[in-house]
C-alpha cells in the first residue's frame, strides 16, 4: 500500500473517532462548541453600540428649554439679537452661569440615550415615568416642540430612566445630561460675587470693618497711615486698638472680600421672611468694605454644620448663609464656605504682630524712659542706614551692642492680649521713642493687678502685659549702664 493511500486511511480513522466523540458529548449533554459560541456572543454584545440619538440638532436650532420639577422649574430662552448668552427668565436681574446654560443647550441638541430599556413598555410606573421627577420641553426654531419625562434612577446608578412624553419607549440616559431639569433654578446662578484683586486694588485699599454679635467692639483695618516700610502688611488695625498686622495670617481677613464666591444660591430675591429664616435679620457678623468706587456689605447669618456618616449635624461649621450688597445681580441668600469667611471667627489677637511699635533703630533719634524715680534719655547717633556710631545714656556713652539688645527687648514687648478699657491711677513707667522724621510712639504702663500691667499706646489703652516684662526692662537698663548683658527672658 503506498503512502498516499495509507494517509487517507489514517485521516478517515481520525475523523471517525472525532465524530464518535461529538456524538458522545451530544448524548451526554456536553457541548463545548455551543458554549464557546455563546461566550463569543456575550463578548460581542458588550462591545456593541447600544446608544440611541434622541435629538439630532444644534444649539442654534433651539429657541427655548422649559422644565418643571419639585422646585418649580424654569424657562431658558436663546440669546436675543446682539447677545451671546442664554437667559433663564425666572432669574432676570440675577447674574447667571453662561457655562451651565450653554452646556445644557449643547447636551440637549445632541441628546443621546445609553440604550433602550424597553420598547413600547406597558408599565411606565415601574420606571417612575407616570409621575416623573422632572419634565422638560424643547422648542425649536421651526416652532416644533418635544417634551420628555425623567423617571427613577436605573439599575445602573449613573443613569436615569427616560422617555418622550406620549411614547412608551423607555431609555437610560446619563444623569449628568438630565440633572439640569430635576434641580432648582438657583443652580444656574453665577456664584462668583466679587472680582479678584488686581495691582491697583492694593493702593486703592479702603476701610474694612467687622461687627460681630459676640463682640462688644468693632475691628477696623485700613492702610498704614505711616506707610511703614518695616512691616510686612501694608494694612494696620485701627480699632479696637492700633496694631500692626502679621501679613501672613491677616491676609485672608484684610483681603478676603476680593475674589469672594459662594458655593450656591439658596434663595433668589429674598424677602424679610427669608432673612429671618436664615438668621440674616440678626446676623452673626456684618463686614463692610468701602473705598474709592466700591461699597460692599456682607451679612453672615446662620451656620450650616458638617454632617457625620449618619447624616447628623456635628459641631464643625461647614458654611454660612450670607447676603451681599454692593454688587449688581447678586440679590440672593448665598451659601458660602466657612473657609472663605474668616470674619465670622477672627479675633484681633489672631492677626496682629508681636510688635507694639515698629520703629527701625536706624530711624530713632532718642528713647526717653520715665519712672517715678528718674528720667533716662538714650541718644542714638547713626548714619540712618546701617551703622550706629554711638549711644549715650544721660550724656554717658554706653556700648552700642548692649543698647541694640535693649531696644530689641523693648520693641518685642508681648502683645498677645489686647485691652481697651481706660486704666485707673497714675502710670508708673513711660517709654517714648522719638524718630528723626518727627514721628513718636509713647507707651505708658499702668498697674492692673499684681501680675498684669495695662499699656496705653499713643494715648489709647491697647494691651495688657505681664508686669514681669517691665521689671526685666528696668533691670536691663541697669545692665546696659553697667556694661552687662541684656536678658531677654522675664
Image: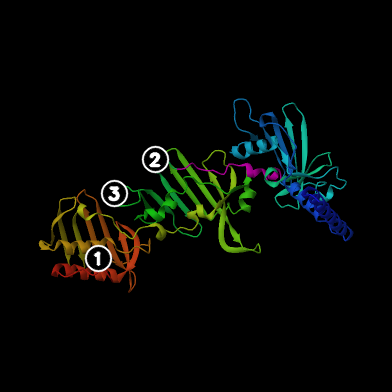
| On screen, residue 473 above or below 116 | below
The residue where tag 2 is placed is: 199
| On screen, residue 238 above or below 81 | below
Q: Nearer the viewer, mark 2 or mark 3?
A: 2
Q: Residue at x 74, y 26 (%)?
A: 142
Q: Residue furthest bottom?
A: 450
Q: Is residue 335 left or right of residue 421?
A: right
* Label annotation for residue 429: 1
Q: Nearer the viewer, mark 1 or mark 3?
A: 3
Local secondary structure at mark 2: helix
First in sequence: mark 2 or mark 3? 2
Q: Residue furthest front?
A: 1
The quarter of the image holding the C terminus is bottom left
* Image location (x, y in percent) of residue 422: 35, 62
Circle 1 residues within 10 Å: few <14, some 14–19, many ≥20? some
Residue 96 visible in this rendered orientation of the protein:
no
* Label annotation for residue 229: 3
Residue stretch in magenta: 178-196
Task: Work out how far the residue at label 2 is from the one at label 3, CA to CA, in angstroms.
Answer: 18 Å
Which of 230/48 is in front? 48
State yes or no: residue 180 in magenta: yes
Q: Residue at x 25, y 54 (%)?
A: 359
Marks 1/2 in contact by CB < 8 Å: the verdict is no
Residue 113 visible in this rendered orientation of the protein:
yes
First in sequence: mark 1 or mark 3? 3
Local secondary structure at mark 1: strand
Amino acid at each position: 500500500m503506498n503512502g498516499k493511500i495509507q494517509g487517507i486511511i489514517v485521516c478517515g480513522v481520525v475523523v471517525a473517532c472525532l465524530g464518535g466523540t461529538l456524538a458522545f458529548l451530544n448524548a451526554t449533554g456536553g457541548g463545548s462548541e455551543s458554549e464557546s459560541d455563546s461566550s463569543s456572543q456575550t463578548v460581542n454584545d458588550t462591545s456593541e453600540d447600544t446608544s440611541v440619538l434622541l435629538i439630532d440638532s444644534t444649539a442654534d436650532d433651539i429657541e427655548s428649554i422649559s422644565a418643571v420639577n419639585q422646585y418649580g422649574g424654569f424657562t431658558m430662552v436663546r440669546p436675543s439679537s446682539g447677545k451671546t448668552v442664554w437667559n433663564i427668565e425666572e432669574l432676570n436681574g440675577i447674574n447667571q452661569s453662561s457655562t451651565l446654560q450653554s452646556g445644557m443647550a449643547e447636551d440637549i441638541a445632541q441628546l443621546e440615550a445609553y440604550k433602550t430599556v424597553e420598547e413600547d413598555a406597558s408599565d411606565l410606573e415601574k420606571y417612575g415615568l407616570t409621575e416623573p421627577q422632572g419634565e422638560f420641553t424643547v422648542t425649536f426654531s421651526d416652532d416644533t416642540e418635544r417634551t420628555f419625562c425623567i423617571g427613577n434612577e436605573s439599575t445602573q446608578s449613573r443613569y436615569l430612566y427616560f422617555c418622550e412624553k406620549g411614547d412608551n419607549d423607555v431609555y437610560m440616559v446619563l444623569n449628568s445630561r438630565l440633572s439640569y431639569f430635576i434641580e432648582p433654578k438657583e443652580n444656574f446662578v453665577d456664584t462668583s460675587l466679587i472680582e479678584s484683586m488686581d495691582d491697583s486694588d492694593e493702593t486703592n485699599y479702603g476701610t474694612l470693618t467687622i461687627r460681630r454679635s459676640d463682640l462688644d467692639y468693632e475691628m477696623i483695618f485700613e492702610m498704614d497711615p505711616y506707610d511703614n516700610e518695616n512691616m510686612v502688611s501694608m494694612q494696620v488695625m485701627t480699632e479696637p486698638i492700633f496694631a500692626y498686622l502679621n501679613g501672613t495670617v491677616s491676609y485672608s481677613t484684610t483681603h478676603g472680600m476680593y475674589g469672594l464666591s459662594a458655593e450656591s444660591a439658596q434663595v433668589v430675591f429674598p424677602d424679610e421672611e427669608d432673612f429671618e429664616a436664615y438668621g440674616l435679620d440678626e446676623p452673626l457678623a456684618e463686614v463692610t468694605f468701602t473705598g474709592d468706587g466700591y461699597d460692599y456689605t456682607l451679612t453672615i447669618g446662620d451656620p450650616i454644620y458638617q454632617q457625620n456618616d449618619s447624616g447628623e449635624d456635628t459641631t464643625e461649621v461647614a458654611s454660612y448663609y450670607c447676603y451681599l450688597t454692593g454688587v449688581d445681580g447678586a440679590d440672593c441668600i448665598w451659601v458660602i464656605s466657612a473657609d472663605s469667611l474668616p470674619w465670622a471667627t477672627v479675633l484681633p489677637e489672631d492677626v496682629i504682630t508681636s510688635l507694639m511699635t515698629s520703629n527701625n533703630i536706624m530711624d530713632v533719634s532718642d528713647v526717653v524712659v520715665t519712672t517715678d524715680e528718674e528720667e533716662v534719655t538714650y541718644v542714638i547717633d547713626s548714619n540712618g542706614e546701617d551703622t550706629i556710631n554711638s549711644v549715650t545714656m544721660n550724656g554717658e556713652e554706653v556700648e552700642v551692642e548692649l543698647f541694640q539688645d535693649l531696644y530689641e527687648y523693648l520693641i518685642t514687648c508681648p502683645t498677645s492680649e489686647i485691652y481697651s478699657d481706660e486704666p485707673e491711677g497714675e502710670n508708673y513707667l513711660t517709654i517714648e521713642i522719638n524718630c528723626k522724621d518727627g514721628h513718636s510712639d509713647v507707651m505708658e504702663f499702668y498697674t492692673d493687678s499684681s501680675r498684669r500691667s495695662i499699656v496705653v499706646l499713643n494715648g489709647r489703652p491697647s494691651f495688657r502685659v505681664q508686669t514681669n516684662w517691665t521689671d526685666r526692662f528696668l533691670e536691663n537698663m541697669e545692665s546696659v549702664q553697667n556694661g552687662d548683658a541684656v536678658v531677654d527672658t522675664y
